[in-house]
Image: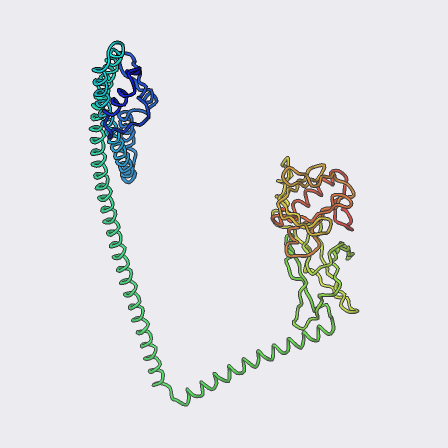
Amino acid sequence: MTRVIHDSGDDMHKEALDLVSSDVNFPKGRFPDYRIGPNNQIIDPEETHEAVPLKEIVAKETAQLLEQHKRLSVRDLKEKFEKGLSGASKLSEEAKRREAASLDRQVLLKKLRDVLDTLKGRVAGRNRDDAEEAISLVEALAVQLTQREGELIYEKAEVKKLANFLKQATEDARKVAEEERALALAEIEKARAAIEKVEKALHVHDSASSSREKEEIEELRKEVREARRIKMLHQPSKVMDMEFELQALRTLISEKTQLCNQLKKELAMIKRLEEDSSDLFELEGSNTLGSQFCIVPRVDGAPNIANCPIQWYRVISGGTRELISGATKFTYAPEPFDVGRLLQAEILLNADRIVVQTDGPIDNAAGLQRYADSLMKRTDIEFNVVVTQMNGKDYSSNSVHVFHIGKLRIKLRKGWSTKARESYSTMMKLCGSRGGGNAAARAVFWQARKGLSYTLAFETDRDRNAAIMIARKFASNCNIALAGPGDQGT
């Protein structure tokens, strides 16, 4: 804005400033920089970057609420209305603040116009024209503020309407929620009453059945007492005493007979043990592939063989024994190579050799051959295993590996990493685990090459035996006899 007083002196300038009321709050130390836009509108540069008008915000929020009304539950609708109500209250407060600011601007413009009128009367010439131009600008600014006040009053009315609407909607939502809660509580009370009725009926039924059973038992007792009374009336007391004595004697004789027979059996067993020490122990287990044999004492007085050397043998046709290399524990799990043969365990006790033998040859497991044939039809034959030992030492990791049996080679891998992969050769060995243990029936010993061996535990004994049978079949097709250490290939 052009300054009105250019060179009228310091006294006139101070007098003009003194006419301004002291209660006016100037936000800045200078007059604002207004500019005239199209249609002679006064534009404030600070208001060109204002936010979206309040009316548009209210319309947008109302549209969103109406759009979401159908797909909101009662509780969510109530929360949304409460949030809208709080937002409307905030908007109302903001409108009040804007109204207060507008009133401050009206007071400021009035004071400014009075000052300009005073200056107009005291100046002449070009300065008077500048003062008149400033007065016209102030009047235009006052008109603009009046228009904005009207819009602000309209927006305030709209905010009040929206607040009332949201308040009423919130009250309606609360009423609906309370009605639903009351209905739910009524249903719960009905369900509780029904449950109590059922419990009472069950209790009455149980009490009636128990009382009826008690009555029946009491009637049976009365009948038994009556029968005993009748029997006592028809039999003399001396005969009854003799019968009781005879019954006691029969019971005593039966007990003595049982004791005598038990003593005879123990004497016969002791004599047989003195004649043949091999009867001190026996093999416990089933003669079926997939089981596990264990040497156990036959009598309580058998000596301790914990530190005695033990060696397992398989009996070939003709009575020839073949030593099973590495089988020197109390337990041994048969493998497919033992099918159709007897198994013996030789115990060296002091200077005596005690031999225990299976009752019959080892039988093949039911369905094992059919299972192995079905696996051989596949392109890839893989089994999930866990490495328990590597080169005779315990393996620290218990992670799952994959044991792949191919027609030309055997491979052991973990994920994409290959631990061992060897073709069938005379250096390769594969047999059941001979180190004992509870899982011997599910474990195999695999020597991939000289200096590299693994003990692998399968998921089931059927997988273990099928893997041995399939590997030996593929090795036989390559003219390789795949057996265990020290075994003679078939």
Query: In front here: 249 or 419?
Result: 419
Give the residue at x 47% y 86%.
Answer: 245
Give the residue at x 71% y 57%.
Answer: 343
Q: Quadrant of residue 381?
A: top right
Q: Position of residue 157 (x, y in %)?
A: 20, 28
Q: Is residue 339 visible?
A: no
Q: Residue furthest bottom?
A: 238
Colour scheme used in the picture?
rainbow
Asked if residue 322 lies left or right of residue 6, the reply is right
Asked if residue 246 lies left or right of residue 461, the reply is left
The correct choice, above or below, for 312 with respect to 12 in the image is below
Asked if residue 136 lies left or right of residue 360, the reply is left
Query: In front here: 121 or 480?
Result: 121
Q: Quadrant of residue 234?
A: bottom left
Q: Position of residue 160 (x, y in %)?
A: 21, 31
Query: In front here: 158 or 339?
Result: 158
Q: Position of residue 481 (x, y in %)?
A: 76, 44
Q: Quadrant of residue 64?
A: top left
**Image quadrant in which the N terminus is located:** top left
Give the residue at x 22% y 26%.
Answer: 107
The correct choice, above or below, for 272 with respect to 68 in the image is below
Q: Is residue 326 visible?
A: yes
Q: Position of residue 209 (x, y in %)?
A: 30, 65
